[in-house]
Image (cartoon, grey):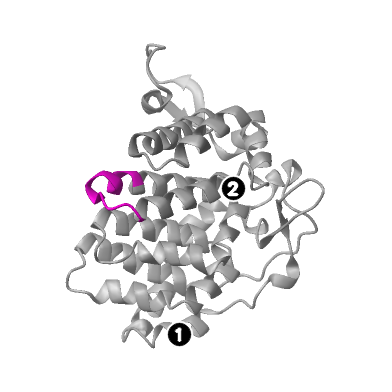
Amino acid sequence: MESLLTLSFASLSSRDIPRIRKGLRQIEGLLAQICLSNNRLSPHKRKTSVVNDADKRECKQLRELRRDAAFREFFRLQEGFKWNVASRLIATLERLMGMHSASQTDLLILSALDLLQGILLLHPPSRTLFNREDYMNLLLDLLDSSNPPAVQSQALLVLVTALLDCPANTRTFEAIDGLLTVTSLFKSRNTTQEVKMRTLEFLYFYLMPESAPTSSSSAPNTANLQRSPSKLRHARTHSGDDGDRMDVDEDEVRDTKTTEDKQKLLGKHLSNVAELVRDLRENAIFAAAGAAAG
């Protein structure tokens, strides 16, 4: 697996668009091998690529992934920055956004965002990367009106995943005027209806009360794969004899906020927040998803 990651990281670090595309497909292929069942829905020729072949295979259930040796090894590798895919994808996004050939880079940005969302779901500790203002700003920059609606929508999905079960990330988002950015996108006449709906979904998500962080004495390892992802949080980086790795530092956990706290903050930028809160409570928005996750 280290060899596959080395090859893909070498491609992603290039400024050559075809090489970056190749690197993204290599990451996609690796994730497909880890997350998809070997049972195919229909016969398929071996010469077909892994990515195309993924359409013919079923997703593994979470309980299967937890027992899967390949997934456990992948999870272990993500604990160190040398093999961390999320950090490489963020660097790739930064590079793509600095290129001027938008017609060629937009699709690659979409692909990178899609993979980043998947990685943040598979390896929750990687979400702590967005505790950094520069990384959080990267997602907010993708919400700019100069970007196509598809990029804006996907960036909102990644933003939700980055904030999920990470109050410290939400504090960073608030500190750099993330609420102003999102509400401005929502109110803009130039924003498409689809993006407005994504933005509204994000605001409902943001208004949900935060749970107090669960204490953890060590960085997630293979034993922690049985835990709820909500317990894999608040990682920090430090160097030791074994190199850089992600670890848990409870001293860096910031205060959580209630719906009322967030309502006051959001009310500075939006006039109908009380209606959103009422909808959130009366219609139990996200309750079904939460029950399924539990």
| Residue occupied by mark 1 | 265
Q: Residue at x 35, y 49 (%)?
A: 109
Q: CA distance from mark 2 to mark 1?
A: 30 Å
Q: Give the side of residue 121 with respect to residue 244, left or right.
A: left
CA neighbours of label 2 inside 10 A, class few (<14), some (14 to 19), many (20+): many
The amino acid at mark 2 is: His
- For the record, the magenta segment spans 98-108
Magenta: main secondary structure equals helix
Amino acid type for the residue under numbered disc 1: Leu
Q: Is disc 1 placed on a helix, strand or loop?
A: helix
Q: Give the x, y percent position of residue 24.
A: 42, 37
Horizontally, residue 284 falls left or right of residue 130, namely left
Looking at this view, name the residue that lies furthest to the left. 189
Q: Answer few, some or many: residues within 10 Å of disc 1's Cα (few below 14, many 20 plus, some between 14 and 19).
A: some
For the residue pair 189 and 131, the one nearer the viewer reads as 131
Number of callouts in the render? Answer: 2
Residue 101 part of the magenta-drawn span: yes
Q: Position of residue 127 (x, y in %)?
A: 56, 57
Q: Answer with the quarter of the image where residue 48 lies.
A: top left
**In the rendered structure, does residue 59 fall within the stretch colored magenta?**
no
User: Could you say which disc has been placed on residue 123 in the image?
Assistant: 2
Residue at 47% across, 42% down: 13
Seen in the picture, residue 268 relative to 206 is either above or below; the reply is below
